[in-house]
Structures are given as C-alpha cells and as structure tokens.
C-alpha cells in the first residue's frame, strides 16, 4: 500500500514587511511537525532583510499579489506574483453598472 500524499499547510497574511513574523511562524510550525508550507500574501512590501528572511524559511512557495511592485532584484525561485488587475477591473465595471461587487467573492 502506498503512502498518502503529504498535505500542504497554507499560511495567509496581509503583508510581508521584513519577513521576521514569517520566519517565526514557519519555525513554530516546523517544530510542531509541519513539513510542507505555502504562504499567500496580499502586499509584498519586502523591506530590509525581508527577502533574505523569506528565502531562509522552509516555505515551498510564496504567492503574493502585485498590489506592491516586486522589482526583479526582489524575486526568487519560490515566489509567484499574481495580478489583481482583472479583479479590480471587474469590480470597477460592476460599480459603474450598478452590479453586485460582493458577488465577486462568492
């Protein structure tokens, strides 16, 4: 009988500023036995040692939005930047036409 696939633990946060909270969270989860972690972040501010701290973490994937520009020198192999432009465009269109914006989040 084969082994069941290992589940991912997903961390959500509003921003990565300096990355220290992220490192502490990843360390705590690792000490609790968590082995596969992903993080989803709205605002990738990445100031100070944030990139170094994030790269040092054992996160398998860091997924952020483009609400804050991520310059080329701040990008690393486990980083995915997703565009929020289509969502914002649809929200603006719905506001203009009187349609429900909350329906976008169902």
Image (cartoon, grey):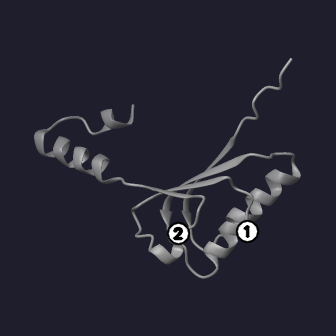
Per the image, the residue denoted by label 2 is 75
Position of residue 28 in the picture relative to residue 86 (left or right): right
Position of residue 2 in the picture relative to residue 87 (left or right): right
Residue 75 position, x and y percent, is 52, 69
Residue toward you, 10 or 102: 10
Q: Residue pushed farthest front?
A: 1
Which residue is pictured at 68% across the width and 63% down the height? Answer: 22
Residue toward you, 29 or 79: 79
Residue 65 position, x and y percent, is 44, 57
Local SS, label 1: helix
- Circles 1 and 2, Cβ within 8 Å, touching? The answer is no
Residue 80 position, x and y percent, is 51, 56
Q: Image quadrant for the C terminus?
A: top left
Can you tell which mark lies on residue 1?
none
The local crowd at label 1, few if under 14, some if 14 to 19, many if 20 or more residues have their Cα within 10 Å, is few
First in sequence: mark 1 or mark 2?
Answer: 1
Which residue is pictured at 38% across the width and 36% down the height? Answer: 105
Per the image, the residue denoted by label 1 is 56
């Amino acid at each position: 009988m084969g082994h069941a696939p290992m589940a991912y633990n997903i961390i959500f946060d509003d921003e990565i500023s300096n990355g220290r909270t992220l490192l502490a969270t990843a360390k705590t989860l690792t000490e609790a036995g968590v082995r596969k972690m992903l993080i989803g972040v709205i605002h990738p501010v990445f100031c100070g040692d944030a990139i170094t701290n994030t790269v040092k973490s054992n996160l398998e994937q860091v997924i952020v939005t483009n609400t804050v520009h991520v310059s080329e020198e701040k990008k690393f192999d486990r980083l995915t930047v997703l565009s929020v432009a289509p969502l914002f465009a649809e929200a603006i269109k719905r506001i203009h036409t009187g349609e429900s914006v909350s329906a976008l989040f169902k």
